[in-house]
Amino acid sequence: MAAVHSILLSLMSNHTHIHILLPDDAYHGVPTQFHTLFDTMKHVVSWTMVDMTDIHQVEQLLRTRIKENRGRQREAILVWMETPSNPLCKVTDIGAICDMVNMVRKEETDDDDDDKEQMITTVVDSTWAPPCITQPILIGADAVLHSGTKYFGGHSDVLLGLVSCSPFTSSGKSLSQILPTVQNTVGAVASPFDCWLTLRGLRTLHVRLQKQCQTALSLAKFLDNHAHVSKVHYPGLTSHPQHSIASKQMKYGWYGGMLSFEVSSEEMACAVAGAAKTIQRATSLGGTETLIEHRASIEPIGRVTSPLGLLRVSVGLEDVEDLKVDLDMALNVATRVVSS
């Protein structure tokens, strides 16, 4: 979260106002930060929720915002992407969004504005698709954000966030010059031990992800055919709405170690999470242990976006057959409990 806030503070140093185009499905901590810190400061930071998989809607909002603000104030527009998204596993076409932003930069900004490229910044939260799967900067993004607590550390024992800036784009270069100053003055600096633990985790990132992605795909197919599961969200399934984009954007046929599935009700979902034995009920992700979570239960009251019957699964390194047995048992037990 310090990484998220550092990006905003960096943009504030050169602009009087920031407007964020924020995905309608994203890690709840990001909009919570905006609502908590900036709800009474919308003259400084404002935001609009948008379906980032609908590029035409994103373009329309972007052009409208630029036109409405023309000649009024020095505003930065932050196009925030999260792919795959948390928890619905929506896949944003990073390249298409960045190409569209570049086109809008040229068409909608004044030719005599030397800073026009830096008026719009594209950032990708790629926590669910680490660099060995997706490299947003090489696809065109100005910056990429990762929660190092998750896959980078990989052992559920790190507290660390990262921002990497593009050396190829004007906005990326500008952001890279300001971020270190923000980090040092605000104090958002990871401890040496957390940095060491993250370096340790990076040594096994590739092999861990290979196993987690293979297991996640197998579990997604298993759940997709289960009688007590109504819907599965996983980019590796051919039925996923953005499967073709994921196949292009995510390397090696690896679609990530995160998946979500839906059951009939909130009561059923909580019963499944409680009945699992091998799979642990917990909030984090990206570690060696498989975790399950009823997402709606931890989202802020009044801003619950996850379906009430949805369960999010972070796949660990256990044997896939053990996980299938555990999920099948939990689903069958929960069905009997709820129907009794």
Image (cartoon, rainbow, N blue to C red):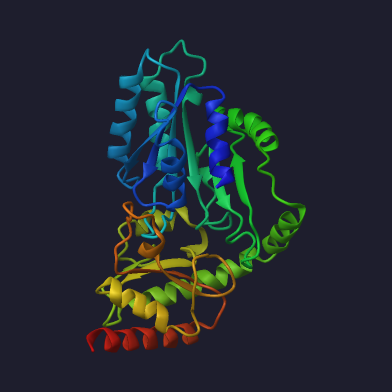
Q: Is residue 217 above or below residue 116?
A: below
In the image, what residue occupies the spot 61% across and 30% down? Answer: 173
The quarter of the picture where residue 219 lies is bottom left
Q: Is residue 140 above or below residue 236?
A: above
Question: In front: 198, or 257?
Answer: 198
* 231 on left or right of 37: left
In the image, what residue occupies the spot 59% across and 31% down? Answer: 175
In the image, what residue occupies the spot 55% across and 49% down? Answer: 135
Q: Can residue 88 be seen?
A: yes
Question: In front: 117, or 103?
Answer: 117
Q: Is residue 266 above or below residue 91?
A: below
Question: In front: 28, or 224?
Answer: 28
Screen quadrant of the C terminus: bottom left
Q: Can residue 224 be seen?
A: no
Q: Position of residue 234 (x, y in %)?
A: 38, 65
Q: Position of residue 176 (x, y in %)?
A: 63, 33
In the picture as drawn, the residue positioned furthest to the top comes out as 112
In the image, what residue occupies the spot 36% across and 60% down? Answer: 88
Q: Position of residue 211 (x, y in %)?
A: 56, 73
Q: Position of residue 145 (x, y in %)?
A: 55, 46
The quarter of the picture where residue 331 lies is bottom left
Numbered marks: total: 0
